[in-house]
Every structure is written in structure tokens, then in C-alpha cells.
């Protein structure tokens, strides 16, 4: 993808900072009513959740001339994306990377003119060896691992001939969808070292190789055109002004009445209208509703009529990875500009270099270890020293997405049988209620692009009830 242009600025896939931040969009966000008497006001459509699925749905409905109210449980917008600061630097605590392959979000960034930042290229990689860890040139490390991933995913072309429509070959997928990532790893009969190199690259994404579906990884590989360079490249670019700024710009265009701190308790479809009640005591009515919260959260809301068996099962099984944690670190170490990759079983499975500071290195890490407190400097330092013995953690800030009551998990990674057994069913409307979340996207499930795809589909489904 070398030479890609966005907002008139040429970018290389692993380049340096190249784009300036655009002026931030402004939107008015209201807290819930402070009145003792419960509010009951009408809209054409209510959108529950102000993540990318929700704000995209809200704008699509507004463009149809409909009045939209957005109810957001948190005191901020963005959902599982969250732009904040750490050690004086802008950081993303949730979803961050975008790519030209992800056409919805890439087009949005171009249209908003926010610009793009490309993470710097690592100068070396720290990967497993037979006896511990060793340094490799990035081309050697990713070349070797990429070849293993291609072998792991060799059936992707057959099973996913159209990556945007993952169930085209449902007849073949039904025989493979029950398999976990671990099932595929075992069938490959890898050497000990090759196993180490593959488990970190496959199992870490899905909350462990025993949890994640083999077909989920194959689908991701197909979305990346069965190409290791493109697979690695999708985690390179990010919006210069931050994910929250991009979500706010979309929400501004939606011109919606946004209520923060408004977690939803119940949604009642009477057949003529939908009544949404919040845990703060407010009550709102609309002709239809878009539920734009993660699948893992569905079972925390009371629905009447009740959710379908498929939706209840999806929420109980989880789509978003319940163990997903992300952490930002300021490290003093000899590591330098090095990408760190560990086998499955280590408390931190990936460390990505982001910026060289005056006396330290800014890195972002990922963990699926529930025993690790990602906001505890001493614990994080012990975890890092398992791989980098001379590391000193000067500061850390983490987010445990599974412990967030409004997420109950990080990015989506389907489990066995969920693709063929649940995806179609949970994408369908439920009376006057439709569902939007990256978790149930047909394309980039687990990414912002998937959230936007799902938001557009849900808006199309409910708009027919509110046509004016």
C-alpha cells in the first residue's frame, strides 16, 4: 500500500507521522433530566449506544429526515473506542487502527479531512527462540510468521470466496465452523518453535486458541486478500485527531438529541411504538429503536417481547473477547524501537513501539491474562520482564474491556459455530427493534469499519417504521 494518499498527504504503510489534526467538530451532549418526575418524550427513532455503530445509524436516519435521540450509558461517546491522553501523548484505549481495505471508515476519514497518522516502522522484532527470546530483522520475523499464517489459513479462499459475504459457502463452512484455533494448530503438527510463533499470532486475538473459532481467523485472512503484508498492514494507520473526534464529527452531522449517563434498563415493543426506559428513571418513545451496544451486553437489557433464542445465546456465549485488555506503557529499557511478540500463555502477548520519548519508550500492549492488573505498575513490570529483563515501567494506563459493564468484552472474535449458527439470525430485525454492533458485521467484525457497516444496515431496517 505504499504511496496511498489521504487528504492530499502521501503515506507509506509503516511510515512516520504525516498528517495534521483537523479542527475538532462540535456537538452538544446533554445529561439525563434531573427532574424527579420521569421524562417521556417522543422521537422517530431512538439509538441506544453512541459508539461507531450508533452514531453511524443516527446520521443515516437523520439523512432520511428523521428525528433521532441517542441514549449513551457512559459519560462519553465512542463505545469501545476511546481517545484520551497518557504521559502527555494522545492515545487510544480501545479500537484504533484503520486501513484502505476498510472502505466505510477510510472514506469517512477522507470526507472529514481529519488526516492519518502512520505508526513508525519497528527496527527489529523480539520473537521466541528455542530457549527464550531473540532479536530478528522485521523482514525475517514477519516473513517467517507470515508464511506460517498462510499455511494456517490455506482453506480461506475455498471457504470465503467473497469475504464481504461470509456465508456464501455455508455448506462448506458448517463442517469447519465447529473447530477452534487450537484444533487447527494441532492438526498442523508444528515444530515446538513454529507453534510458539503461531499461537501468539492466532490465539491472542480471540481470547485464547481454545476459545476462538478457526473460521474467524480465516475470514480475517480473506478480508486481507490472503496476503500477509496486508494482514500486518491493517494495524498501521489511525486518525490523526483520534477516534473520538471522528465519532463526534459523525454525531454532529446526525443532529441528534444525545443523552449521556443514560444506561438502558428495558425496551418494550408494543407493536405500535417502542418504549425505552433508562436506569435513571427516564422513559422515551419512538416508532423504532436501534440497539447499538455490544452483543455481550444484550442480556443485561430487559426486552419485551423477549430476545430470540439466538440472541440470548450469542450474548451468553460472548462475541467480544471477555478477557481483552489494552495498556499503554512508558518504558525505560534497552529495547528501543522493537516489536515484541510472545507465545500464548504470557501475560502480555504483544508490545508495539509507538514513540521514542526523551528518556523512555512509549509502547502499547495487549493482554488476555485476567490475573494481570493493567493499571498496576509493579505487576506490569514483572510481566514485561519475562520477555525484556532490563525493563523498567515508569508509568502505565490500561483498560480491561471485559470488566467494563457497558462492553463486557473487547473487540469481537467469534467462537465456534457462531458464524454458521448465529450470524444471520442476529442481523435480522426484532419487530421494531434492530441491532447494530461491529460484533455482527458481515465484513470487518471487531473493527470500526464493521461497526459502521452494521449501523448502516440497522438504520435501513428501522427506517421503514418512521418514514415521514
Image: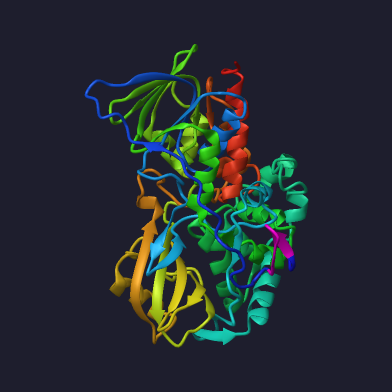
Taking the image as drawn, is residue 24 in sight?
yes
Along the line of sight, which residue is nearer the eye, 212 or 373? 373
Residue 391 position within the rendered picture, expressed as x and y whole percent measured from the top left: 39, 83
Q: Residue most toward the left?
A: 36
Type of colouring: rainbow
Question: Observer-nearest residue: 423 or 67?
Answer: 67
Report the residue at 40% width, 38% height from top: 29
Q: Main secondary structure of the magenta part?
A: strand
* Residue sticking out furthest to the front: 23
Q: Which x, y percent locates residue 95?
A: 51, 55
Quarter of the figure that contains the C terminus: top right
Residue 265 locus on image (x, y percent): 34, 29
Q: Is residue 343 above or below residue 152?
A: below
Pick the front one: 357 or 451 = 357
The residue closer to the viewer here, 47 or 189, is 47
213 up-or-down from 347: above or below: above
- Give the x, y percent position of residue 69: 45, 28
Q: How many marks?
A: 0
Can residue 150 be seen here? no
Who's the residue at 49% across and 36% down the image? 292
Which residue lies at the image location 30% right of the left edge and 29% below the top edge? Answer: 33
In the displayed structure image, the side of residue 308 where residue 268 appears, left or right: left
| Screen quadrant of the N terminus | bottom right
Does residue 273 belong to the magenta stretch? no
Identify which residue is drawn at 45% across, 62% down.
91
Tell me if residue 157 comes above or below residue 151 in the rendering.
above
- Residue range (magenta): 4-12
Amino acid at each position: 500500500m505504499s504511496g496511498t494518499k489521504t487528504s492530499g498527504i502521501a503515506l507509506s504503510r509503516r511510515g512516520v507521522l504525516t498528517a495534521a489534526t483537523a479542527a475538532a467538530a462540535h456537538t452538544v451532549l446533554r445529561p439525563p433530566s434531573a427532574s424527579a418526575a420521569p421524562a417521556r418524550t417522543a422521537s422517530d427513532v431512538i439509538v441506544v449506544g453512541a459508539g461507531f455503530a450508533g452514531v453511524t445509524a443516527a446520521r443515516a436516519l437523520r439523512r432520511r429526515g428523521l428525528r433521532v435521540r441517542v441514549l449513551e450509558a457512559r459519560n462519553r461517546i465512542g463505545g469501545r473506542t476511546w481517545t484520551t491522553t497518557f504521559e502527555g501523548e494522545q492515545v487510544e484505549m480501545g479500537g484504533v487502527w484503520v486501513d484502505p481495505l476498510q472502505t466505510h471508515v477510510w472514506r469517512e476519514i477522507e470526507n472529514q479531512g481529519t488526516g492519518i497518522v502512520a505508526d513508525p516502522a519497528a527496527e527489529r522484532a523480539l520473537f521466541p527462540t528455542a530457549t527464550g527470546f531473540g532479536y530478528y530483522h522485521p523482514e525475517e520475523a514477519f516473513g517467517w510468521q507470515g508464511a506460517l499464517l498462510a499455511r494456517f489459513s490455506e482453506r480461506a479462499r475455498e471457504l470465503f470466496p467473497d469475504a464481504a459475504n461470509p456465508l456464501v459457502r455455508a455448506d462448506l463452512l458448517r463442517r469447519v465452523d465447529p473447530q477452534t484455533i487450537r484444533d487447527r494448530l494441532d492438526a498442523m503438527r508444528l515444530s515446538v518453535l513454529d507453534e510458539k510463533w503461531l499461537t501468539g499470532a492466532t490465539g491472542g486475538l480471540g481470547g485464547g486458541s481454545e476459545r476462538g473459532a478457526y473460521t474467524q481467523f480465516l475470514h480475517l485472512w480473506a478480508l486481507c486478500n490472503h496476503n500477509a503484508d496486508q494482514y500486518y498492514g491493517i494495524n498501521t494507520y489511525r486518525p490523526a485527531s483520534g477516534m473520538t473526534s471522528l465519532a463526534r464529527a459523525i454525531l454532529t452531522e446526525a443532529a441528534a438529541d444525545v443523552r449521556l449517563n443514560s444506561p438502558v434498563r428495558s425496551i418494550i415493543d408494543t407493536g405500535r411504538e417502542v418504549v425505552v426506559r433508562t436506569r435513571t428513571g427516564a422513559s422515551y418513545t419512538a416508532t423504532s429503536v436501534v440497539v447499538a451496544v455490544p452483543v455481550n451486553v444484550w442480556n443485561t437489557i430487559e426486552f419485551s417481547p423477549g430476545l430470540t433464542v439466538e440472541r440470548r445465546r450469542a450474548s451468553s456465549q460472548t462475541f467480544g473477547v471477555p478477557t481483552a485488555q489494552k495498556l499503554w506503557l512508558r518504558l525505560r529499557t534497552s529495547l528501543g524501537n522493537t516489536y515484541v511478540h510472545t507465545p500464548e500463555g504470557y501475560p502480555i502477548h504483544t508490545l508495539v513501539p509507538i514513540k521514542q520519548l526523551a528518556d523512555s519508550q512509549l509502547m502499547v500492549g495487549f493482554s488476555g491474562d485476567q490475573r494481570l492488573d493493567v493499571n498496576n505498575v509493579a505487576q506490569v513490570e514483572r510481566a514485561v520482564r519475562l520477555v525484556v529483563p532490563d525493563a523498567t515501567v515508569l508509568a502505565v494506563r490500561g483498560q480491561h474491556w471485559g470488566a467494563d459493564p457497558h462492553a463486557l468484552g473487547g473487540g469481537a472474535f467469534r467462537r465456534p459455530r457462531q458464524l454458521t449458527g448465529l450470524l444471520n439470525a442476529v442481523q435480522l430485525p426484532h419487530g421494531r427493534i434492530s441491532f447494530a454492533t461491529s460484533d455482527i458485521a458481515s465484513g470487518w467484525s471487531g473493527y470500526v469499519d464493521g461497526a459502521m457497516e452494521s449501523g448502516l444496515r440497522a438504520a435501513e431496517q428501522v427506517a421503514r417504521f418512521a418514514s415521514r
